[in-house]
């Protein structure tokens, strides 16, 4: 099996980067600007194509949903980073 630059498998799987930003917004209910903010803060790291388009995997979708849920409970971004063990 070959992998991409970020070690996403090219074959089918939960880590396959396949969703565009628009689809990710629909699947998570989180606005695009908020997803970009999460990326900027280091909470989410989507795959980038050669033309810099963001592509999200099923694992990324789950992570964004989890982050959104924690935010709704009043946890701030530094707290979420700590809870999820993201450095």
Image (tube, rainbow, N blue to C red):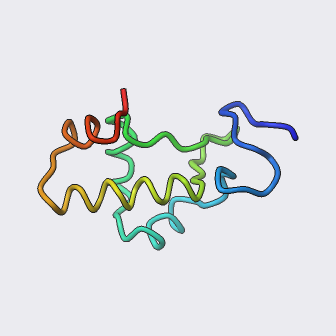
Q: Viewed as shown, does residue 68 lie left or right of 45?
A: left
The residue shown at (26%, 35%) is: 82
Residue that lies at the very extreme toward the right in this rendered image: 1
Kindly give the residue lying farthest to the top in the view shown. Answer: 87
Side of 20 where 27 appears, left or right: left
Work out which quarter of the rendered image holds the N terminus and state it: top right
Q: Quadrant of residue 28?
A: bottom left
State the count of labels. Answer: 0
User: Can you tell which quarter of the image residue 47 is in?
Assistant: top right
Q: What residue is shown at x 32% (from left), y 45% (from top)? A: 37
Q: Which residue is nearer to you in this view: 68 or 35?
A: 68
Q: Quadrant of the C terminus?
A: top left
Q: Nearer the viewer, residue 37 or 27?
A: 27
Residue 45 screen position, x and y as percent? 49, 39
Q: Residue at x 48, y 71 (%)?
A: 27
Residue at (44, 66) in percent of width and height: 25
In percent of width and height, residue 64 lies at: 40, 56
Q: Position of residue 6 (x, y in %)?
A: 65, 33
């Amino acid at each position: 099996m070959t992998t991409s630059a970020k070690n996403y498998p090219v074959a089918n799987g939960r880590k396959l980067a396949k969703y565009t930003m628009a689809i990710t917004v629909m699947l998570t209910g989180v606005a695009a600007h908020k997803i970009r903010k999460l990326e900027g803060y280091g909470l989410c790291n989507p795959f980038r194509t050669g033309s810099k388009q963001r592509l999200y995997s099923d694992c990324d979708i789950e992570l964004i949903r989890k982050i959104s849920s924690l935010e709704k409970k009043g946890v701030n971004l530094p707290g979420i980073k700590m809870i999820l063990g993201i450095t």
